[in-house]
Amino acid sequence: MMNLVNSTAAREEILFSPSTYKVLAASVGTIGVLGVCNNLLMLLLYCKFKRLKTPTNLLLVNISISDLLLSVFGVVFTFVSCVRGRWVWDSAACVWDGFSKSLFGISSIMSLAVLAYERYIRVVNAKAIDFSWVWRAITYIWLYSLAWSGAPLVGWNKYSLELHKLGCSVNWDSRNPSDTSYVLLLFLGCLLVPLRNIQDLQSVRLAKIVTYEKNMAKMCFFMITIFLFCWVPYAMLSFMLVYGYASKITPTVTIILSLLAKSSTAYNHIIYLFMSRKYRWCLMQLLCSRLMRIKWIIKDHAVRVRGEKPGKPIVLSEKVAERPKKRVTFSSSSIIFIITSDETWDMDSAADDNSTNPNVIQVRPLKSERA
């Protein structure tokens, strides 16, 4: 827990100009709103469309949940502090701010590592995972994240204000051997090991994955790349603090890299939209159905205003029935159309049985008048 005197002094310290605080507040608010909206939309699509309910997409849902919670709990304290121009919360809020950001951030990166491993066993070992495997993996992810983020709560390191005094995190610049050991093992267990596994998968098996699982693999790799682009600079900054370079790091640099790390929560759904045909199709179907419902509501309201009898609204079904397959064969005497879902239907037997089978239509040409 932070010392109350130090916390009060930090709250009174002004590091940026009023206009800079306004820019920071706008940036933090934008990141939070985009993160909440994008991840809520992802969860809505998964719940509404059955075709998205696959084991792999369940891992994507877990990432969206982590990003959604990080967009809420990892932004609200910083946003209010930017608006007020200083840290306005007590020590308990600082601990919760640091704990929540650590918990949901570790959960996101571990989920991406498990997603990369799932791609590996699916392609290299030709083994399809099931929902029970994914649920166990998600359980391990959250327990693992809770263990690392909960360690500072029981005395192994602690959560304190960062250099920019607008948010809290692990105490990176502590010289205590216990605190330093936690930071080093945190980097090893929550960044370097997952990153190493992801890099091995990308470099060794990239060609094979692109051949067999091109779209999904490209989407996963792009998500991982964007996540690392956002978080690695902040991690390197923290690592510099561990090794005593705090005097060379300014509050401006720390707040910029901190916002870059938080912005990772807003990108995933954009990646889903541009790189997954299923998500694009479901999103378009969702938007079109909503627009048509709004159109009919407005039309019925206008009809009621004119005193006319409203017509029945068109009910849009989101379930597309499986269409039967159509097969056509030609002969010297006729053309046979077969409408069936049975791929093994025999053309000859269908032609003989067309008089009794309603799914078989035989069209004979008109006989020549000369004949």
Image: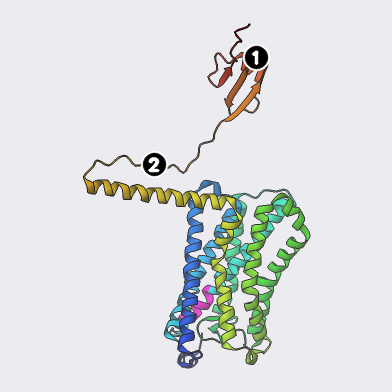
List x then y, in percent, for residue 122: 70, 51
List x then y, in percent, for residue 329: 65, 23
In magenta segment, residue 172: no
List x then y, in percent, for residue 51: 55, 46
Q: Which residues are magenta?
A: 93-100
- Indicate the amino acid at tag 1: Ser
List x then y, in percent, for residue 133: 62, 53
Q: CA distance from mark 1 to mark 2?
A: 45 Å
Tell me which corner region of the image, top left, top right, bottom left or bottom right, holds residue 117.
bottom right
Q: Residue at x 59, y 79 (%)?
A: 257
Residue ID for mark 1? 333
Residue ID for mark 2? 315
The image's colour scheme reads rainbow
Tell how many labels: 2
Tell me which corner region of the image, top left, top right, bottom left or bottom right, holds residue 314.
top left
> Does 332 sit above or below residue 142?
above
Residue farthest top in this picture: 371
User: SS of the residue at dot 1?
Assistant: loop
- Indicate the amino acid at tag 2: Val
- Give the quarter of the figure containing the C terminus: top right
